[in-house]
Image: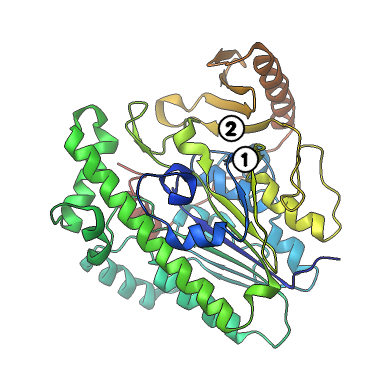
Amino acid sequence: MNEWEHVILLSADALRADHLSCYGYRRDTSPVLDDLAAESLRFTRAYSASSHTREAVPALLTGEYPDVAVSENYRLATETVATTLSERGFATGGFHSNPFVSRAYGFDRGFDTFDDDLHLGQHRLVALAQRALDKLRNRHYARATEINERSLDWIDSLAEGQPFFLWNHYMDTHGPYEPPAEYARTYLGRPMSDKDAQSLYQRAIADPDLITDDERERLIDLYDAEIRYNDAQIGAFLDALRERDLLERSLVIVTADHGDAFGEHGYYEHPRHLHEELTHVPLLVRPPGGADAVVSTPVSTLDIVATIEDELGVELSSERESLLDPPADERSVFQQARGENDDAHLRRYAVRSGKGRCFCERDHRTDAVEFAGASERSLRSELDSHVERRMRRENGAPSEAEGTTDDEIERRLSALGYKE
């Protein structure tokens, strides 16, 4: 029987592991997470199942690879851990403001309360007022302070003794990087307005080759400041759990959906590639009473749902592992990402293990596969077998009808750099 009454999943958008001080970063960006890591299982080689929100978050919430978790138009296509826990008597709540994993794409399934910061068609007058206000204050997402407040209000509304599953997804580390002024001053040598920060971020995506070394460093300064802000807000949330006597009764998992790039491979932000900067994510798992271990065996964000289900007595598939009983032996973890725009016909895959890494691209039109970057011959064979299994699964999976989004979602996505 599990030792926890509640499950709390805290994920940050676009947070790469190597920019946290508890992962060896040169700056002290994460004092709160450093302290949490000291009383948690810290996974040094945790990898997201994909490199961007539309495939990474579905995998995170379902424990399934993206080609199963979402349909061709990125609507949720399978049940999430929220449904599993709801069926076992847990209250379930989700709080975030990323339009790609909103109720417009079916992600409210299984949640009793799902606050995606979008009104979508309900309460239309309120939605119109929100849009007008958001445009005036250049607001693209709910800050971590708002996510904390909403989720804590929800916790406080529950009946005494009610077990719950809470998912908070923080957007602050996603571009455009516009940290609050007191945090921006931590790393930024000279002031920069939100308008200028957004312009620099958009230029980096559109014309990465034109970004100067100085501009790149400014982007990193802004990003690190957002990390420091987000870290402080996670600290405030954990303090609130302690005050409510909930922390020691909860399984707490902290991770990210993917990372972000700063020109290392000729691009910024997180396009549909599978490089280390985009897929190596932080992962801390704190059971009640804490733990103190550093795990170097490769793990996947797919293992998060497996961890929760294993404690509930659900049988795990052979590719999943419980993070509370991490494997001592080496294992391989796999990733995938669909191409977009001119690369829409491509499917990218990667494998990572103690032996190294290997990448491949499959042309969806012809099923031709091209390999690259294999650090050892056996990895190519391993990835080839994995891709063949995924192709068989993909070819047997029906696609769903095209979904729709409203004007508010389009505006938010444009501001976040997703659309031209």
**Dots 2, 1 in contact, CB < 8 A:** yes
Estimate the x, y position of residue 390 in percent, counting from the top left.
70, 28
Q: Which residue is mark 1?
A: 66
Q: Which residue is at 41% across, 66% downward?
A: 232
Distance from label 2 to label 1 (Cα)? 7 Å
Residue at x 65%, y 56% (from the top left corner): 292
Q: x and y percent of residue 199 in the render? A: 19, 47
Q: Position of residue 391 (x, y in %)?
A: 69, 25
Q: Residues within 10 Å of mark 1 (few under 14, many from 20)?
A: many
Residue at 22%, 64% in the rendered image? 181
105 vs 227, left or right, is right
The answer to which of 191 and 167 lies nearer the viewer is: 191
Q: Is residue 234 above or below residue 383?
A: below
Q: Amino acid at mark 2?
A: Gln
Which residue lies under the disc numbered 2? 336
Image position, residue 108 (x, y; %): 60, 63
Q: Secondary structure at mark 1?
A: helix
Q: Tell me which label, 2 or 1, sits earlier in the chain.
A: 1
